[in-house]
Amino acid sequence: MRNEPEDLAVGDYELEERQALRRVAGLSTELEDITEVEYRQLRLERVVLVGVWAGGTALDAENSLQELKLLAETAGSQVLDGLIQRRDRPDTATYIGSGKAIELRDIVAAVGADTVICDGELTPGQLRQLEEVVKVKVIDRTALILDIFAQHAKSREGKAQVELAQLQYLLPRLRGWGGNLSRQVGGRAAGGVGIGGRGPGETKIELDRRRIRERMAKLRRQIKEMSTARQTMRHRRQAREVPAVAIAGYTNAGKSSLLNRLTGAGVLVEDALFATLDPTVRKARTSEGRLFTLADTVGFVRHLPHQLVEAFRSTLEEVADADLILHVVDGSHPDPESQIAAVREVLAEIEGARDIPEIVVVNKADAADPVVLTRLTMKERHSIVVSARTGAGIGELMSVIERELPRLDHEIRLLVPYDRGDLIARAHNEGEVLSLEHTGDGTILHARVFADLYAELDRVAKPVETV
């Protein structure tokens, strides 16, 4: 049995496990015929990126392609080249147009790439026709993000959610390779006449589609069952009136680092997109000792696939049920405003999230341009600048959280019997204890509490004035 350092957190072990297996460049065997490759498996090794600049500035298009590069590298690929095609709108046939598709084919052959990644969600027809021209595997941004989620999902619920999203994406794009997936002769396919005209009469691709639908239905049932435990815990916290704070934001903005800084949770932290997918809920206390929960949620990204939003809906409910949202922003990013807009676009799809108070937490202040920080704080009035790495601004953030948590409804001064010490403990956990005084008859409790605890205290305690 090996000796493990005692100061390593759970996230450190997860990071070590994730980095334990790395692809070695130049040792892979490539297939020249892409029809030999199973369609559902992505081969992400040596890739060329291509995007369509259909609106906005050139800088916006470059930032989008740069983000695609980070996504591709997170998935484990080596980016060889990146191209941007200026068009009014993506070509309906080949995404970038027939002429540019031929140019792309020549570039792919020249650099020795085996995969093309498009910065957008392509239709099944666009994928097929572009593949026919460039002669290598073509995937889109959505498939790339789904692949990263599949690599990083750890929990049973997370794996089920990712598989459901992948099947939703795959179903309309399913197609056969080779004769083994061609149409059978039997049944209605042959009109049901003569020898060979009887049989199942169902194509292999139709069988695949039916099996995918059955699997999706099973996954939805499993996710619903698994979400019951999360709902039970959430309802228990709500019944005890423990305020909930949700950490949301763009991927790699530092949400997990902030959670570790505020609570010492020790969750996985990695400088990569979508490093953590499984939500983590931890307890924290204000400076006055008031208990609240902090929930780290999955990161968002521009054009987050709607399949993921749908599949992760039970996880995103942590945001909808929160009393306060900490919207974490990467202050060192070249375009943090677009990240804020992308996150709010996803939050708008979550029922009830729009009405929850929001604090914009501009993170990575130690690496950010002061001019950018000033610009962000001017635009976002309800914001605060912190550094989860160095701890700068964390004390001020806790003060803001304390100020924004739901107000305690009742201020009480009651004599609580000694045999009801559980109510004193609840006052510490759920409310704000102003003073305690022990007497011969019981404990004089002066505190601010919610209505639920107030009603219970009112039944068993006595007003101090009547003693």
Image: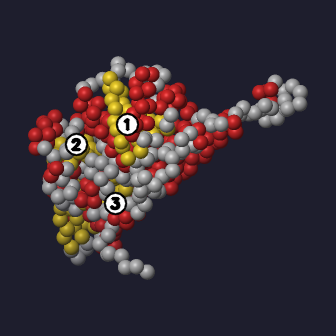
Q: Nearer the viewer, residue 331 or 317?
A: 331
Q: Residue placed at 13% from the left, 37% from the top? A: 375
Q: Which residue extends farthest top?
A: 88
Q: Are marks 2 and 3 in contact (CB under 8 Å)?
A: no
| Three-letter residue code for mark 3 | Val
Q: Which mark is residue 101?
A: none
- Pointer 2 or 3: first along the chain: 3
Q: CA distance from mark 1 to mark 3?
A: 32 Å
Identify the residue position indicated by label 2 in the image: 333
Identify the residue position indicated by label 3 in the image: 267
Q: Residue placed at 26% from the left, 41% from the top? A: 357
Residue 139: percent from left, percent from top: 46, 37
Q: Which label sits in the foreground, 2 or 1?
A: 1
Residue 440: percent from left, percent from top: 23, 76
Identify the residue position indicated by label 1 in the image: 49
- Pointer 2 or 1: first along the chain: 1
Residue 373: percent from left, percent from top: 14, 42
Q: Which label sits in the foreground, 1 or 3?
A: 1
Q: Which label sits in the foreground, 2 or 3?
A: 2
| Three-letter residue code for mark 2 | His
Q: Residue placed at 65% from the left, 36% from the top? A: 178
Q: Residues within 10 Å of mark 3 (few under 14, many from 20)?
A: many
Q: Nearer the viewer, residue 450 or 101?
A: 101
Q: Residue 444's quadrant in the figure?
A: bottom left
241 above or below 372?
below
- Pointer 1 or 3: first along the chain: 1
Q: Nearer the viewer, residue 147 or 438?
A: 147
- In terms of secondary structure, where does tag 3 sit? loop
Q: Is residue 163 left or right of residue 195?
A: left
Q: Quadrant of the C terminus?
A: bottom left
